[in-house]
């Protein structure tokens, strides 16, 4: 039997204190039986939990699984990750997107080795001081790995809480989000409970949101906590939470140059991204942003940045979407007698691999699409 949390009566209370023990027992009992069998649920190793939590940000479980396995095979522990070359880390991440996550993981691993003896810190302030660790990730890792009593609030948990309490309005408004965080904390089983409960509890809340209390089709008939759910009682579950105002899609064109020398080598650069975070320090073709395909502007850029003056042959275009950006990739083949030398240029790092071999480098899926258009034209 779980030890009930002391009742906190007030505006953030979602479940009445006297109902809380039964509510907790029902949800944990359901989770024990219904939880999906996922790799990271077989471990309480903080490193592995941390990797899974970072990968799962903005990414579906099915997409994460193969990356998670490969990443851990390559970097089985914090010290292995800390010792790795940045290129190797990014290569293991290539295709998963949001590359700042990989760079932050790498930096955080180094800090964990340098400052915490290679062990993910237990104190939330120390965890929050690491690169790429916010409130959600810190609470998730500390509760799952160490049983520390921190409640997580992600999109799934926020939706469950909003429906349980029939909370109206935009959940992402800071004041409302803080109130949800307070509600989540009030539901957490008491600290005196066995060490695993905080982690199990958080995972149970997230699992309920991911599998039953889904945005468009809440399965209230199968829900273990339906009898406490105000939205269900009011028949408004489908209307909650209120839809978020999405940013308007931004349309842009990326004109990219696939340089090619007589030996089949191309030129890739690595630099602080000029292109709205599209490449995030991955290897990329020289490119410029514009409203539509802009070969003249691209030609001027090639001349000024690399001293290359050659004809631009249009290649097949491709579509690419990153969050709210709708990007038209407009690649051009540029045959050059000679490529700039390997090394550091004023525009960042420069590399000249064979076009057919750029897959070996950390590249984004946009770069992959551009290369595919060039290879298709050359074959
Ligand atoms: Fe979600 Fe329905 Fe369960 Fe309420 S009863 S928590 S709306 S699944």
Image: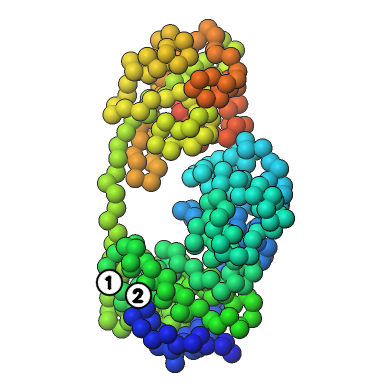
Q: CA distance from mark 2 to mark 1?
A: 9 Å
For the image, the number of numbered tags is 2
Q: How far across and how far down the image is residue 277, in percent?
A: 43, 38
Question: Which corner quadrant of the image does residue 333 belong to?
Answer: top left
Question: Is 288 left or right of 265, judged from the image as shown?
Answer: left
Above or below: residue 64 compared with residue 209 = above
| Disc 2: CA contacts within 10 A as few (<14), some (14-19) or many (>=20) | many
- Of residues 309 and 95, the one drawn nearer to the viewer in this rendering: 309
Question: Which corner quadrant of the image does residue 117 belong to?
Answer: bottom right
Q: Look at 58% across and 59% down and name the residue there.
A: 127
Q: How far across and how far down the image is residue 321, in percent?
A: 38, 41
Q: How far across and how far down the image is residue 100, in percent?
A: 51, 44
- Of residues 103 and 288, the one drawn nearer to the viewer in this rendering: 103
Above or below: residue 367 compared with residue 309 = below
The colour scheme applied to this rendered structure is rainbow
Q: Which numbered dot is residue 252?
A: none
Q: Look at 43% across and 79% down and name the residue there.
A: 223
- The reply to whether the residue tagged 2 has its Cβ within 8 angstroms of ligand 1 is yes
Question: Is 230 left or right of 205, judged from the image as shown?
Answer: left
- Of residues 262 and 145, the one drawn nearer to the viewer in this rendering: 145
Q: Which numbered dot is residue 168?
A: 1
Q: Look at 39% across and 71% down and name the residue there.
A: 180
Location of the N terminus by quadrant is bottom right
Question: Which-is-in-front pick, marks 2 and 1?
Answer: 1
| Disc 1: CA contacts within 10 A as few (<14), some (14-19) or many (>=20) | some
**Quick check: can you spot residue 48?**
yes
Question: Is 163 left or right of 50, judged from the image as shown?
Answer: left
Q: Which residue is mark 2?
A: 163
Q: How far across and how far down the image is residue 217, in percent?
A: 36, 69
């Amino acid at each position: 039997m779980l030890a009930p949390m002391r009742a906190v009566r007030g505006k953030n209370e979602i479940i009445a204190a006297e109902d809380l023990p039964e509510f907790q027992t029902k949800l944990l009992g359901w989770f024990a039986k219904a939880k999906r069998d996922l790799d990271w649920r077989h471990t309480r190793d903080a490193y592995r939990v941390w990797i899974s939590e970072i990968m799962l940000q903005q990414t579906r479980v099915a997409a994460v699984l193969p990356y998670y396995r490969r990443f851990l095979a390559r970097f089985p522990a914090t010290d292995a990750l800390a010792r790795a070359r940045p290129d190797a880390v990014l290569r293991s991440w290539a295709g998963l997107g949001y590359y700042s996550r990989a760079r932050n993981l790498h930096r955080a691993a180094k800090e964990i080795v340098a400052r915490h003896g290679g062990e993910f810190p237990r104190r939330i302030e120390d965890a929050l001081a690491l690169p790429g660790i916010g409130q959600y990730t810190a609470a998730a890792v500390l509760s799952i790995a160490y049983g520390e009593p921190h409640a997580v609030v992600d999109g799934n948990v926020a939706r469950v809480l909003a429906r349980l309490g029939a909370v109206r309005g935009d959940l992402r408004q800071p004041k409302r989000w803080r109130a949800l965080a307070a509600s989540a904390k009030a539901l957490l089983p008491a600290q005196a409970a066995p060490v695993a409960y905080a982690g199990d509890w958080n995972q149970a809340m997230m699992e309920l949101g991911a599998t039953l209390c889904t945005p468009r089709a809440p399965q209230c008939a199968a829900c273990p906590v339906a009898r406490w759910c105000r939205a269900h009682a009011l028949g408004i579950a489908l209307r909650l939470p209120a839809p978020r105002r999405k940013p308007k899609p931004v349309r842009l064109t990326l004109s990219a140059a696939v340089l090619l020398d007589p030996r089949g080598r191309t030129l890739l650069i690595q630099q602080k991204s000029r292109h709205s975070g599209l490449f995030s320090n991955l290897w990329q073709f020289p490119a410029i942003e514009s409203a539509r395909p802009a070969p003249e502007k691209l030609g001027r850029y090639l001349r000024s940045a690399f001293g290359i003056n050659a004809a631009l042959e249009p290649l097949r275009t491709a579509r690419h979407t990153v969050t709210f950006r709708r990007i038209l990739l407009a690649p051009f083949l540029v045959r050059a007698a000679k490529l700039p030398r390997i090394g550091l240029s004023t525009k960042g790092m420069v590399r000249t691999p064979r076009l057919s071999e750029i897959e070996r480098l950390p590249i984004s899926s946009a770069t992959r699409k551009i290369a595919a258009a060039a290879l298709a034209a050359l074959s």
